[in-house]
Amino acid sequence: MSTREALLDRLKGQEIVIPDLYAVFSSWVQIGVNTHYQELVPVADERLETIFEDKHKLSALRASDFAFFASTWWPRAHYDELRVLMFFTIWLFNWDDEIDEPMGCYSEDLDAAEEYRSQTIDFVLECLGLHDRPSAQRFPAQNKIIASFREIGEPLAKDYTIDQRKRFMEELTRFMEKTSREQQFRLCCGIPSVEEYWSFRMGTSAVGLVVAVQEYAMNIHICDSVMRKDTMIKSITDETIINISIVNDLLSLRKEISKGCIDSIVPIYCAQGMSVQNAVNEAVRALEASKSRFDKAAQSLSVAAQQDPLKYKHVSEWVEGCQSLCMGNLVWSLATGRYDISQYCAQSDGCVRFTL
């Protein structure tokens, strides 16, 4: 039995309690669900049917409710932007599942996964108008998931400046690089340390990519030098990634263990010698610390904006948008059929209780 198999065996059958995570965000305003939610449901279904034919897979994807995902993460977005953002989330989830899920086409084949990454980068560069090769030398994407980025990239290319598109591309490249490193680690049957895990997760979560479309979602344009160089912007971006990653790791734990996946924060804490419940508690403490760092950075940005309102124009809206991402992630994660844990959430105290 490998180290990974032994850890998985140790986790199965364990009972855990996740405390009320809404309490962590009690000082943040919860906006709610975008008014276009119901309007987007059939659009999401149609979109999935253009990419996938397998009825079992389609059923599982519909349970994820991508319309609700987009509507909780971007509660104030206008319909046209929200539709593109929903397509983006469908693309991200399904692109990642091909590598990350046990039944994914490239899950166990690193060489094929590297080609998949390379083709994706090539196609996204083209869609964003950033390719350095003449169009005559390029080939259309053959993979349906990759090709479905066109309906996302073209609106971004139209609305985003070249600097905004380059920032998006930098995040995509980081996402690709980190998924490669994580996959190599997994295929070598290794269990990362907590530090190694976070070095992967800051990219593999894809939250950095989601933050990179915030200006599109909110119809705003923030000074490129602020977005690239301000340390508090980077801090809020990092804490948004950490926040969403921890909540995802906690609330998807039952699903991940059932599929034999241990590459998330609770199992990795357990590999360091913690009990499962202590690992959950430690993850919640890390979430609270991340939220505190977010608030501190937001306060610093608020002071900077008061001193130079022109330079920091729209930054306060962007910060609120990042808060909405975190809150929306919690709302969606507790409700989605992808994790299927709503039945384990107690109305009395907000805790989630289940057996792995």
Image (cartoon, grey):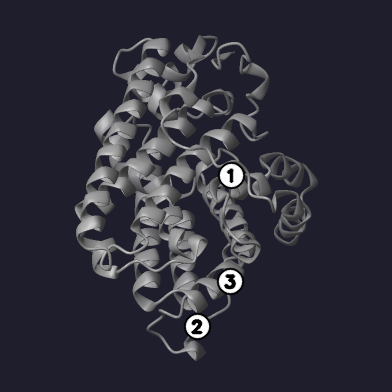
* Residue 25 x %, y %: 43, 30
* Residue 148 x %, y %: 62, 65
Is 310 on the left or on the right of 97, as rendered?
Answer: left
Q: Dot 2 surroundings within 10 Å: few (below 14), some, or many (20 or more)? A: few
Q: Earlier in the sequence, mark 2 or mark 3?
A: 2
Asked whether residue 39 is in view, the answer is: yes
* Residue 128 x %, y %: 47, 75
- Circle 2 sits in a helix, a strand or a loop, which is it? loop
Amino acid type shown at disc 2: Arg
Is 25 on the left or on the right of 342, as rendered?
Answer: left
Alpha carbon of mark 2 to alpha carbon of mark 3: how far?
15 Å
Q: Which residue is mark 3?
A: 150
Amino acid type shown at disc 3: Arg
* Disc sitting over residue 138 in the figure: 2
* Residue 344 x %, y %: 63, 17
Is 89 on the left or on the right of 6, as rendered?
Answer: right
**Picture quadrant of residue 307:** bottom left
Q: Dot 3 surroundings within 10 Å: few (below 14), some, or many (20 or more)? A: some
Quadrant of the image containing the C terminus: top right
Question: As rendered, which of 189 and 24 lies closer to the eye?
Answer: 24
Residue at the image point whose x is 24% and y is 56% from the top: 306
Q: Which residue is mark 1?
A: 72
* Residues at circles 2 and 3 in contact by the CB criterion of under 8 Å: no
